[in-house]
Image (cartoon, helix red, strand yellow):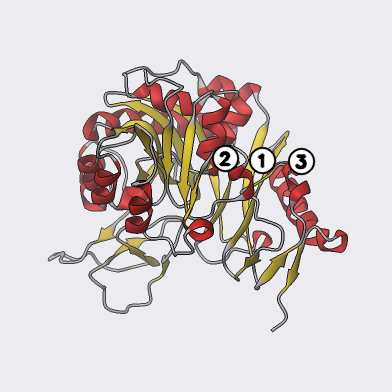
Amino acid sequence: MFARLQPILLAGITVRMLAEMATRAGYAVVSLDYFGDADLRGLCPGISLRRDHNISFTPDALVNAANGLDAPAVVYSASLENHPNQVARLAQKRTLLGNAPETLVRVRDSRQLAAALRSAGFCYPQTVWPGDEIVPEITGQWLWKPMRSGGGHGVRVWHGEPLAKEGILQKRLPGMVCSATFVANGLEGILVGVTEQLIGEEAFGASGFRYCGNLMPPRLPHDELLMLLREVQSIVNYITAEFGLRGLNGLDFIWHEGRVWTIELNPRPTAPVELMEWVYDLRLFAAHVQAFTGQLPSFDLEQAIRDAPAAGKAILFATEDIILGDTRSWFERDIRDIPYPGEHIRRGNPVCTVLAKAATPDLCEHKLEQRVDEIKNMAQLGAGFIPVQV
């Protein structure tokens, strides 16, 4: 096992969640991300591209900034899974506690992922890739998606325009959009949580196909939820062995007509992980690190769902340019990714993340909406945000 006193570099566009999980598990960490939120700075030392270097986020800029940080190991988060060459640079002279660059090349290739799943009898939506010689009949509604992205960025309804080489067409399936989190050791995986995704919710300032949170567990009848869990576990075991996945990983899928239709594999810790750690009393950063020695946690998700409350997280996006007031009290309100007092946030950018527990997922969603409204109304107390006068 990696020694807990040796600092681990956490790298990605945002790493607050990983830092919180790591420090809770007793690991020493150093952060390197774009946002450098106020609560992250309270957890560990580190560098923020925007606050310390005043530069935009690019994977290359992030990795360049890592050169000055002394840490013998590294864990990466979004969106480095789309940049295997930069992951290789990060891992130079460091122990890589994440999926290797060659694994990323395979699993982030949707054509390879689809072929592997279909060959094993699992479902993958009808898809058209650039260069396909045989194009299926285009009926129903289809989506245009970037070849590699995340969080729903760039996804749009296709209206018949020519297919660009950097994107794919995928048939839109009705059903519940979900995500699963699992820990893998290269041979098998353990499912530690399944959530319903919140997509384009106006209450949280999102629109279109933009990811804006999760509810756990998904809002399904119990028997149907058990069917979902068991098929997801089968998929997790198969893809872990097929691609040699290790550590924490995420699977995005649609629950459609009683089957799991995989739409994306995220080979790194994903956003819902903190809900599972919070509600199921797990130490998932430790599980991630230990997976690289072959160890997997002993965990029964079906039992955990029966015993634990529901939970949810929502990302609040700015619907106009705003300036924050005094945000120091936000630490006590189950708010995360907290901006600094007086910070200017542009329309469409994330403001913060809100967490909630309740008896049911529906009550969780209601509680999240209430807390977002509270944040918006805090302006009356000088602690919320104020529209920028143009």
Q: Is residue 84 visible?
A: yes
Residue beneath disc 3: 332
Observer-nearest of 275 and 220: 275
Residue 165 position (above or below residue 274): below
Question: Is 259 located above or below residue 292 in the figure?
Answer: below
**Residue 46: horizontal and vertical position, in percent?**
50, 44
Q: Residue at x 28, y 58 (%)?
A: 127
**In this orientation, does residue 190 appear?**
no
- Disc 2 marks a residue whose amino acid type is Pro
* Dot 3: element: helix
Q: Amino acid at mark 1?
A: Pro
User: How many neighbours does mark 3 have within 10 angstroms: few (below 14), some (14-19), or many (20 or more)?
Assistant: few
Dot 2 corresponds to which residue?
Answer: 218
| SS at circle 1 | helix
Q: Earlier in the sequence, mark 3 or mark 1?
A: 3
Residue 240 located left or right of residue 332: left
Between tags 3 and 1, which lies in front?
Answer: 3
The residue sitting at the bottom extreme is 390
Q: Which residue is mark 1?
A: 361
Q: Earlier in the sequence, mark 2 or mark 3?
A: 2
